[in-house]
Amino acid sequence: MKIKMKNKIIWITGGTKGIGIETAKLFTSNKATVIVSGRNDMGLTIANIEFIRCDVSNSASVESAYNTIIEKYNRIDVLINNAGVISYSPLHEIEENEFDRLMNINLKGQFLVSKIVLPKMIENKSGKIVGIHSIVSFDTFANAGLYSASKAASKKLMECLREEVRQFGIDVINIYPGATETDMWDKNSKAEREGRMMFAEDVAMGIYNAVATSYNSRMIVEEVVLRPKLGNL
């Protein structure tokens, strides 16, 4: 079954770089209308990809971004919750403000953005909400306690949401990427792991295929694990 994305309205949070922008480019190349949001535009100048400013941890900012999209397009077909931040530190070195930062963006951000798109999706009895989490949601790594906790919490939030909205024709899809070469890694870390990590465009393909496949009226792709072929780092 060939899935056409033409005329689909896609909102990608944290969409100005890395996995977000590669996903945006892939949907755009398949004729979707793509709006990416972020706290700044990162000099984004890609044809046919719109930028809107949004801090997902701030409810007023989320509401403003949502209203701007709805005023122009009157609906959102697919929300991709990609905004996120990373932190690797042993627990005894984590400051309270770092805890708040990760939880506000990685968990509260998914809550606020998913919550605001739901009423119209429920009204339309159609929509897809994608949560981009991480393999740290279920795999264990030293010094990743805070990051893992934020991603495990967002994973569970989306799992429960899926059960709440099935009856309205809304699909909730969870994506769990492993190590991916993005700006979240510093230059030395990338060099040490050269050839071991996926690229952002690889993950984008996994996201696109999960969304596209779920347009089958009889089936949903609920969970997708994307891992480097040589396994975890």
Image (cartoon, rainbow, N blue to C red):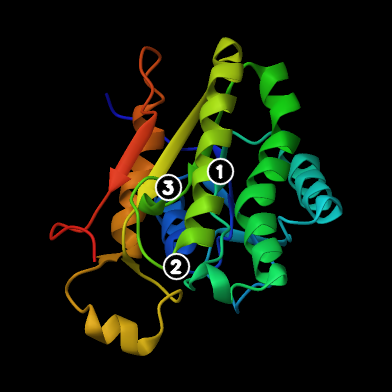
- Residue designated by label 2: 18
Q: Residues within 10 Å of mark 1 (few under 14, many from 20)?
A: some
Classify residue 194 by image quadrant: bottom left
From this view, report whether residue 17 is shown above or below residue 54: below
Chain-order first, disc 1 or disc 3: 3
Compared to residue 30, the image places residue 128 above or below, namely: above
Rendered location of residue 53, percent (x, y): 73, 63
Looking at the image, tell me whether mark 2 or mark 1 is earlier in sequence order.
Answer: 2
Residue type at mark 2? Gly
The kind of secondary structure element at disc 3 is helix
Nearer the camera: disc 2 or disc 1: 1
Q: Which residue lies under the disc numbered 1? A: 153
The quarter holding residue 36 reads bottom right
Query: Does residue 218 appear left or right of residue 150 in this picture?
Result: left
Disc 2 or disc 3, which is closer to the eye?
A: 3
Q: Amino acid at mark 1?
A: Ala
Q: Which residue bears the numbered disc 3?
A: 137
